[in-house]
């Protein structure tokens, strides 16, 4: 039976319309995984010695102190990046397979996930170093097994959290509150959690508790999906009751207003689009890495423009790169109507411009770090409106990824978003403004650098109509390829 499942997985991969893209992405993902493994391996080998030399003569105590944040951060990363196979088993309902077999296969696939295996490349070398340093074998083994059990607890918890945003935001809130409490010396949660992890070392037999907990969570996940394993029940999409909102204030935009209203309703009513808005808000604080001097490598003047592009363009990048994928569920119907492509694209452009202006106003607190910081945000916004707004729309024509609006998965991107054309388009989006600023900076200082970036943005805005004619032709050329891609369910 396992061979049958593996054969179906292989056919699903090779018969996909994006097989070539998948293959290239798998190779790149493999290289990325190898770098990640090497990084964790090096960290596992040298962490003990570095902590012993720089921080404390008790490296295990330091690790135990911060393990709570390690596990919470792991849970957050899984939520965004780990794919849940259990969500892709609906087609198996039509095959002569028992529900227990299908659900077991789906959950067991997560056990072999990269997000579980990569931790071994840190904890195994670290445990071996502990043995060489004279720690008793049985104590190290108990501690190691206990941490392994907790990592798999995260794996099964993620299956439940996958469809429950409230739990995810609660975890993120806990991390922020606990981290801030430690930073401002208000409350140190590690005083209470570190002894728990230390107990796994001092009393190795306690490791069985984490294994039992992982097994309980596995059975809970199995029973949950086994109970809701029906086409017309647990796997059915949730349908919310729509509320009428005419949004007449948008009528000032003329014929474009119809599309604008649809986009705003889409953002307000769907999980994935709400996550995109949240991500764009978080982008506002990205500049703190560059403008506060907290990271020495980012302290150069050229990085200010780079940060300004991201601070003001969070929504533009996260929303704009998936035009027209946001409308993939009804895109074929829309293309059969008598509408102008130009109006459709302009509505997306207006939405990104409005969001960029609002974000720039919200980011005015960067004046606290000097006029140069906020000037970088402002000129970044001008460049985003005049140049990058056109580029992301242009790149969207080549990203044929249907979006599930009810799910947060792939909120940071998608494998089909990678191709040579979209890769080349990142150059004028991110590198070109830095080069333009560098020319002005070396010629006459930072003021000229900022002015040149702003001028390029204004020039792009002036040629908006001409650029939109080019983009419209590209969308029409890619129209039928896009329609075919949206029909792909895998």
Image (cartoon, grey):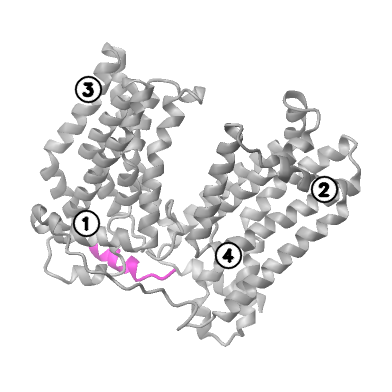
Labels 4 and 2: the sequence-earlier one: 4
Q: CA distance from mark 4 to mark 2?
A: 28 Å
Nearer to us in this view, 167 or 319: 167
Q: CA distance from mark 4 to mark 1?
A: 38 Å
Q: CA distance from mark 3 to mark 4?
A: 50 Å
**Residue 237 x/y as whole percent:** 41, 74
- Give the label on residue 159, or none: 4
Determine whether, in the image, residue 465 is placed left or right of residue 433. left
Q: Is 119 one of the magenta-colored residues?
A: no
Labels 4 and 1: the sequence-earlier one: 4
Residue beneath disc 3? 451
Disc 3 versus disc 4: nearer the observer: 4
Label 3, residues with CA under 10 Å away: few <14, some 14-19, many ≥20: some
- Give the label on residue 199, or none: 2
The secondary element bearing badge 2 is classed as helix
Q: Is residue 72 above or below residue 225?
A: above
Nearer to us in this view, 251 or 263: 251
Residue beneath disc 1? 475
Nearer to us in this view, 179 or 146: 179
Q: Is residue 363 above or below residue 440?
A: below
Q: CA distance from mark 3 to mark 2?
A: 60 Å
Disc 1 versus disc 2: nearer the observer: 2
Determine the residue positioned at 20% across, 30% down: 456
**Residue 375 x/y as whole percent:** 29, 25
| Residue 80 visible, this orientation | no
Q: Which residues are magenta?
A: 477-490
Disc 3 versus disc 1: nearer the observer: 3
Labels 1 and 2: the sequence-earlier one: 2
Q: CA distance from mark 3 to mark 1?
A: 33 Å
């Amino acid at each position: 039976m396992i061979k049958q499942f593996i054969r179906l997985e292989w056919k699903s991969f090779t018969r996909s319309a994006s097989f070539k893209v998948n293959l290239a992405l798998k190779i790149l993902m493999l290289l990325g995984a190898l770098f990640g493994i090497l990084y964790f391996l090096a960290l596992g080998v040298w962490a003990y010695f570095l902590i012993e030399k720089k921080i404390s003569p008790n490296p295990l105590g330091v690790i135990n102190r911060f393990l709570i944040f390690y596990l919470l951060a792991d849970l957050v990363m899984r939520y965004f990046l780990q794919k849940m196979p259990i969500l892709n088993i609906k087609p198996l309902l039509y095959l002569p397979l028992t529900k227990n077999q299908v659900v077991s296969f789906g959950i067991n696939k997560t056990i072999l996930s990269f997000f579980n295996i990569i931790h071994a490349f840190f904890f195994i070398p670290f445990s071996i170093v502990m043995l060489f340093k004279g720690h008793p074998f049985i104590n190290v083994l108990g501690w190691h097994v206990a941490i392994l059990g907790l990592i798999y607890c995260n794996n099964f918890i993620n299956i439940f959290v996958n469809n429950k945003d409230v739990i995810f935001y609660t975890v993120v809130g806990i991390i922020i509150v606990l981290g801030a409490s430690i930073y401002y010396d208000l409350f140190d949660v590690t005083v209470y959690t570190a002894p728990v992890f230390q107990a796994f070392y001092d009393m190795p037999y306690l490791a069985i508790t984490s294994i039992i907990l992982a097994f309980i969570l596995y059975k809970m996940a199995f029973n949950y999906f086994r109970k809701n394993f029906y086409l017309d029940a647990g796997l059915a999409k949730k349908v919310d009751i729509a509320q009428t909102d005419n949004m007449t204030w948008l009528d000032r935009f003329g014929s474009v207003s119809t599309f604008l209203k649809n986009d705003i309703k889409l953002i307000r009513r769907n999980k994935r689009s709400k996550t995109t808005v949240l991500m764009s808000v978080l982008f506002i604080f990205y500049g703190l890495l560059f403008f506060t001097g907290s990271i020495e490598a980012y302290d150069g003047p050229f990085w200010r423009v780079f940060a300004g592009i991201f601070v003001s363009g969070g929504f533009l990048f996260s929303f704009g790169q998936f035009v027209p994928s946001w409308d993939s569920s009804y895109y074929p119907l829309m293309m059969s109507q008598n509408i102008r492509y130009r109006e459709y694209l302009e509505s997306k452009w207006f939405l990104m411009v409005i969001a960029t202006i609002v974000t720039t106003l919200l980011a005015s607190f960067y004046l606290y770090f000097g006029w140069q910081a906020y000037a970088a945000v402002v000129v970044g916004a001008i460049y985003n409106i005049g140049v990058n707004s056109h580029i992301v729309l242009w790149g969207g024509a080549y990203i044929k990824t249907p979006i599930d609006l009810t799910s947060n998965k792939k909120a940071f991107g998608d494998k089909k978003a990678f191709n040579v054309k979209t890769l080349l388009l990142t150059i004028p989006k991110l590198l070109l403004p830095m080069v333009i600023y560098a020319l002005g900076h070396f010629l006459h200082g930072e003021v000229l650098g900022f002015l040149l970036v702003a001028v390029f943005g204004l020039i792009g805005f002036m040629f908006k109509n001409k650029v939109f004619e080019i983009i419209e032709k590209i969308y029409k050329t890619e129209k039928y390829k896009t329609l075919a891609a949206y029909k792909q369910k895998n």
